[in-house]
Image (cartoon, helix red, strand yellow):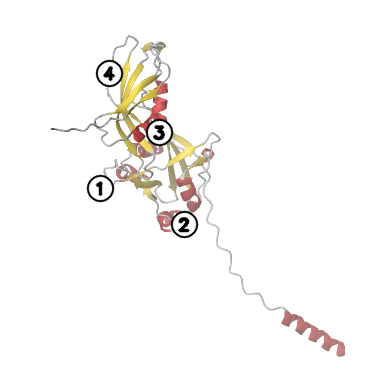
Amino acid sequence: MLKVTTRMVPHMELVVPPQPSGLTRVPMEFGPGCTGCTMADLIKVANYAPLLRWVASLASAAKDVVIGGVELKGVELRGVEVQSMRYDDANPDVITEVTILPILVDGVGKRVHLPSESVTLKPSVTRLMILLEAPGAQPVVVLEKSLQSSSPDERHQQSRLPAVRISEDSSVSGDVVDAVGPTLRLQLTSTKFMALLLPSMRCNPMHGNAEESVWMYAQEVHRETMAQLQYKLQQLSAESREPMTTTYMAVPLSDVTAISTDAMTAMAAANVQQRRAAQLLPSATVAPQRAPTPPPPTLEPRPELQPLYDAKTRRDEAEVEE
């Protein structure tokens, strides 16, 4: 007798905003390409913030609107097939990208086919271009180098602009702020020392909702800082108590597009070069860096004072006797 075994494909219901048909839940399951994915993976996808934002961005079919003379019809979500998911190389518990195949219908129940059937969802990212220049030297950009499984590099290493987080009070945080800022004496803690280079680039909600923006920190630094720049960045990983998954490097601005395989990094570098050539970009976003404070002079040993007091006492006694 031929015995076969069956394995249940993980599936669940995704909570969605009320649809015109009254649905508040739609089925979600893995596609054929997600072999090996478990129910735990599907639950993580269901709670993935970019997916929830994408679902909320779908306009209701009952609320068609006209913008600029163009009628934008809403859609109704009937189901979601997860085609792929990617975890962070440095943190296996964090999802960095999910690709889905949504089942969409219009107001009359007709299936809506997208130009690209799949939708790739990623979290929003803010990147920081640190542009440093010294008199008589070409400008350089600080890039981070980290493991990226999608990178075409043979070691899957990718050089790109470092990511940061910007709070509502304009404060800036991130690994590059904590590590590179103090080392190079840069003021990276607030956007008041920066300028928005590339505003958020949002994808069409029907194709995804990932967006990236780039801020620029430009400063004229001291010659000594520029001369020791590469060495100081290398020392960050050498002096770290724990192995660093991300290292930093200084790259000439003109070489960034050739070195980085990250599209946003290459786009930002090209944008800066073009705007600098046309003199449409400020030469700096913060005052020039002061020269490094020289080390204090070496203190000489303090002389022993008691023998001096004794000698003065003897001299005074001798003068009295005379």
Q: Give the class, few, some or many, for how many residues have Cα within 10 Å of label 1's Cα (few <14, many ≥20).
A: few
Mark 1–mark 3 contact, CB under 8 Å?
Answer: no
Residue linked to disc 2: 224
Mark 1–mark 4 contact, CB under 8 Å?
Answer: no
Q: Give the class, few, some or many, for how many residues have Cα within 10 Å of label 4's Cα (few <14, many ≥20).
A: few
Tell me the distance, in whole angstroms, between the alpha carbons under discs 2 and 3.
Answer: 39 Å
Q: Secondary structure at mark 3?
A: loop
Q: Give the residue type at disc 2.
A: Glu
Kindly report which numbered mark, 1 or 3, lies closer to the viewer in this rendering. Answer: 3
Q: Image height check: is 151 above or below 223?
A: above
Which numbered tag is attached to residue 113?
4
Q: Give the class, few, some or many, for how many residues have Cα within 10 Å of label 3's Cα (few <14, many ≥20).
A: some
Q: Give the class, few, some or many, for how many residues have Cα within 10 Å of label 2's Cα (few <14, many ≥20).
A: few
Q: Earlier in the sequence, mark 1 or mark 2?
A: 1
Q: Give the residue type at disc 1.
A: Glu
Q: Earlier in the sequence, mark 4 or mark 3?
A: 4
Residue drawn at the location 31% of the way across and 11% of the way down: 109
Residue 81: x %, y % from top left: 30, 26
Q: Give the residue type at disc 4.
A: His
Q: Secondary structure at mark 2?
A: helix
Q: Image height check: is 251 above or below 56?
A: below
Residue linked to disc 1: 154
Decide if residue 74 is on the left or right side of residue 313. Answer: left
Kindly report which numbered mark, 2 or 3, lies closer to the viewer in this rendering. Answer: 3
Quadrant, the C terminus: bottom right
Q: Residue 236's image quarter?
A: bottom left
Q: Is residue 24 visible?
A: yes
Which numbered tag is attached to residue 123?
3
Decide if residue 319 is on the left or right side of residue 122. Answer: right
Q: Earlier in the sequence, mark 1 or mark 3?
A: 3
- Residue furthest to the top in view is 108
Residue 225: x %, y % from top left: 46, 54
